Amino acid sequence: EKGTHPHYMLKEIDEQPLVMRKIIQKYQDNDGELAIDGTIIDAIKAADRIYIIAAGTSYHAGLIGKQLIESMAKIPVEVHISSEFGYNMPLLSEKPLFVFISQSGETADSRAVLVQVKEMGHPALTITNVPGSTLSREADFTLLLHAGPEIAVASTKAYTAQLAVLAIVAEVAAKSRGVEIGFDLVKELGIVANAMEVLCDLKEIIEHIAREFLTVTRNAFFIGRAVDYYVSLEAALKLKEISYIQAEGFAGGELKHGTIALIEEGTPVIALSTQEKVNLSIRGNVKEVAARGAYPCIISMKGLEQDEDSFVLPAVHEQLTPLISVIPLQLLAYYAALHRGCDVDKPRNLAKSVTVE
Ligand code: M6R
């Protein structure tokens, strides 16, 4: 039930701090250590490479999962779009582990890959929100998101839950391989949950930004570097699917290789800056587009902010910024759709689970 919320999407955005705390609790053992099933740890330890397979928002979570697993556990990871995997099957390593990320656990494109790799005899783990779903039943192992039912077609709380579970997998894998990650993930995820709460209380500011930047425009660009680039892909998907604004996410450095030609007087460009290492270069990109008439909106992280920024995110651990930077972007899509009179929870042409290939 959506209760006092006007839409499921807004309710699900608001549930994210709660989901975060639930995930921390569900994945802690009696000693307060993060833990997953021993058989899954063995499968990860046996693997020489992880192949993440997913679609849409779950694919975007996979891109960030790769960063988390590679930097924390030092295991090589590839991420593939489910529907493309069959055509462009990569040369597989000797001992691959396949990880399927799917909120619904019913996505036909992902299932087709699961069937294929099971036939080849490879182990598979499904990360899903739905216990007993097809992808969960047909894989060897399952990790649950514990996000509660997600009703709105636009995925929100499942995405941040996927990121949290992927971070936990990375931490546990690192521990099992004797790799020191250098920070306390339980503590940092707690800080993330608090930051999410703060962000959910700042809806008015985001509604105002949506009104200013997205009420009449035909298109919008999101730019970022490093993990901010992956979050900008997710922000663009969210905006297009519910507001029907043509939106694209770009790597800041790619702008000059073509996309900058699209910038016109008043084109909204939303830039994300949560990483110290790219703060100056992304701001350089903002200057480039502004000089060509774009209307820039900078969302930065506390500690990296400058006077011209439209919104400043509370600080969280550098590796976990996508868990919170996506929240204002989810809200931006929500309010843009609302202001444009779109059906937020049931956008045209889309279904919650895509069970056809
Ligand atoms: O249930 P899944 O996570 O497998 O679904 C994958 C995509 O269909 C899904 O993420 C889709 O992109 C969402 N509508 C995005 O908000």
Image (spheres, helix red, strand yellow):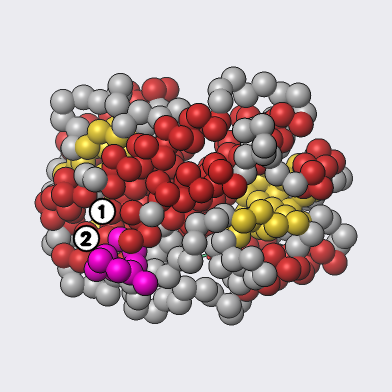
Contact? badges 2 and 1 (CB < 8 Å): yes
Q: Residue at coordinates 61% horizontally, 30% vertically from top-left?
A: 71
Counting other residues with Cα less than 10 Å from the Cα at mark 2, is it few (<14), some (14-19), or many (20 or more)? many
Q: Amino acid at mark 2?
A: Ala
On whether residue 64 falls in the magenta region, the answer is no
Name the magenta segment's main secondary structure: loop
Q: Judge whether residue 118 can be spotted in this image.
A: yes
Q: Amino acid at mark 1?
A: Leu
Looking at the picture, tell me which residue is in the foreground, 41 or 286: 41
Q: How many marks?
A: 2
Q: CA distance from mark 2 to mark 1?
A: 6 Å
The answer to which quarter of the image holds residue 321 is top left
What is the x, y in percent for residue 6?
24, 68
Q: Judge whether residue 247 can be spotted in this image.
A: no
Q: Residue at coordinates 31% horizontally, 32% vertically from top-left?
A: 314
Q: Is residue 207 left or right of residue 73?
A: left
What is the x, y in percent for residue 103?
55, 62
What is the x, y in percent for residue 178?
76, 24
Q: Residue at coordinates 30% horizontally, 68% vertically from top-left?
A: 3
Write down the region rendered in magenta: 1-10
Which residue is at the far front? 30
Residue at mark 1: 332
Residue at mark 2: 336
Judged from the image, the secondary structure of the residue bearing numbered disc 2 is: helix
On whether residue 3 falls in the magenta region, the answer is yes
The answer to which quarter of the image holds residue 95 is top right
